[in-house]
Amino acid sequence: MTTWTTALVGNPNTGKTSLFNALTRSYEYVGNWTGVTVEKKVGQLHRQSGALIDLPGIYSLHPMSRDEGVAVQYLLHETPDTLLNVVDASQLERNLYLTVQLLEYGVPTYIALNMNDVAEGRGIHIDPKKLSAALQVKVIPVNARRKHGISDIIGQLQSANSEATAPKEPLSFQLHYGDKVEAAITQMSALLPEANVPLRWVALQYLERNETVQHWVHNRLDSAQQRKLELIGEETENQLRAHGQALHLAQHLRAVRNSFIREVLSSSVNMNERKPHTLTERIDAIVTNRWLGIPIFIGILYLMFKATFEWIGTPLSDALDAFFSGPLTVGVSSLLDSIGASSFTHALLEEGIIAGVGGVLVFVPQIFILFLFISFIEDSGYMARVTIVMDRLMEAVGLNGKAFIPFVIGFGCNVPGIMAARTIEQPRERLVTTLLVPLMSCSARLSVYALFAGVFFESHQALVVLSLYLLGIVLSLLLAKLFTKRMMKEEQSVFVVELPPYRMPQWQTLFRNTWEKGKGFVRKAGTFILGGSVLIWLLTYAGPGGFGVEMDDSFLAYIGGLLAPLFIPLGFGTWQAGAALITGFLAKEIVVSTMNIIYHAPDAALLEAQIAQAFTPLSAFTFCAFILLYVPCLATVGILRKETSSWGWTAFAIGYSFVIAYIVALLITGVGRLLGYA
């Protein structure tokens, strides 16, 4: 039973989530860019009774985005017993600003000094004992990736919380901000409501105009008391200016903290002569080059798809497909014969479940291989550079490089991609990004591309899939320009992103990342897609005339036929395509399940032959483009509603995506026919 809590706090990209995984022996998704943790996560300390709370990465306790606000809200409402502050040794000066604010919070605090190897490679040598003495807290050197120093941290936290029910002595750490500010803090503390939160810290955050803290305070005071607090802040700022200090009050507080940080650094850090160019800088000179950056990124994507669809993935998928259509189907059929199963049961298992679920599972190797490459790029540090490369282009459409991070995450699944937009500071820019993420090609759509590319574009699968991914990106940029022009006329963009050093990813972490990304696909195949496949098969098995009808006379044919005329101009105006698009709203993988059930054949060659008769190369590519762009899946619609807090914006996202999909598909069809690809 949990008896005490420790909050894990730090700047983005300091190794905080890696440390969380090591301390709890659990696993949270780790990515080498800003904004991976967008809400608090709870884990149990290894072999301890304490809980570890992983808070979002923040630069200070003055929140600029929704995910940073989560950390401040936690400190206000759920006072932890101890704090564990993760600090990047190679960026110590910047990281210590948050440390000072945490020390002012007054809860027993420990500092995990991470990335010492990176610091020493840059000629930075930190004395942990001197740093500990200067900050008046315990500093513990760690290497989160290699799990060095983990037992020391657990021991310190266990010792600090061994008597969790007893009242803890507050930290003695306190900066002096000058007589006028100190007087204001005293006056405000007397007006503030009693709470578990240290009143001096609340007063400082209030003077700093921390909106989250101000809102928390105002909810606990009447209007007269609120006005008194505001007057104290205004009078203090006027007094500072009257004595020749041309700083705002918040700037004054920052200046005092920065002065203290410089004193700490001078007593505990030695700087050797820095190497002229590190390996990271030499690589960055190429991959973030103004002219080479985007072509290199596109080239890397092309190689990923080449390996996924032609070099490695396709042979594995073919082998799995042969197993499902051969030994598995034959074995199940023989088993059913031996127990005297009915023809209905035969059809349900062989044509419904095996064809529907198996038709999706055959693409698991390709999806996992793609995720393996993406995980490698993320953990190596390159993905953070992609945001720098894209920043100039994103600025041209009214966003910034940080908005590209949700797009990249959306390649795996649109749901976490939309959630990652919480890291964007500006509300309207965050809204625009949220509305555009569903245009990113997720892993569910990948199974559709693999099916059609394997049939119609066997020798150019990688190029076809790459073109679809780029189509989603290009359209999102064009729409971003339109949306920001209409919605963000008075909003300035802010772009701050960490650039971690390049590292060779650890294989254990790499495979974990890959599994975490891909397991949702497998899980859906065994649950959601299984249920959907059974339902779709029943709709093909039953019709107005009863059960066992011809598929063209089934309920599914009737439902798909309602939409079929709409898609005639696009080249796939059949009830089969219409039915697949309807079921695809539930989950894009079910498009493949529907196709496999509709065009069920005893082996892969016959299935491909039937699909080849139903589509042409042009209509197949158009169909894939339509799948990319048309309405988001049900799960994405749900998260859109949650993140926008508006059914209006959710309906807009559904509506505009369908219109764009239809227009783009119509253009592809028209251009293709003009070029002779009828």
Image (tube, rainbow, N blue to C red):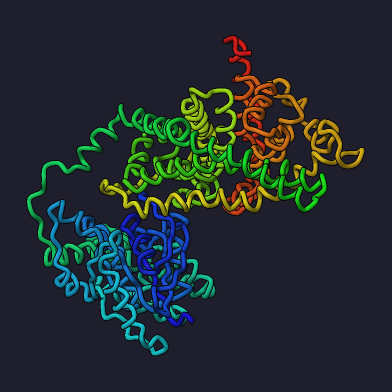
Q: Position of residue 304 (x, y in %)?
A: 41, 35
Q: Is residue 627 above or below residue 539?
A: above
Q: Residue furthest left?
A: 273
Q: Residue furthest right?
A: 545
| Picture residue at 82% right of the left edge, 30% below the top | 552
Q: Position of residue 133 (x, y in %)?
A: 17, 75
| Picture residue at 47% right of the left edge, 74% below the top | 78
Image quarter of residue 228: bottom left
**Left or right: 600 in relation to 341:** left
Q: Is residue 140 above or below residue 457?
A: below
| Picture residue at 53% right of the left edge, 38% below the top | 319
Q: Which residue is nearer to you in this view: 245 or 39?
A: 39
Residue 588 visible, this angle: no
Q: Which residue is nearer to you in this view: 305 or 651?
A: 305
Q: Is residue 606 above or below residue 217?
A: above
Q: Which residue is nearer to you in this view: 13 or 261?
A: 13
Quarter of the figure that contains the C terminus: top right
**Left or right: 661 in relation to 156:** right
Q: Position of residue 224 (x, y in %)?
A: 51, 74
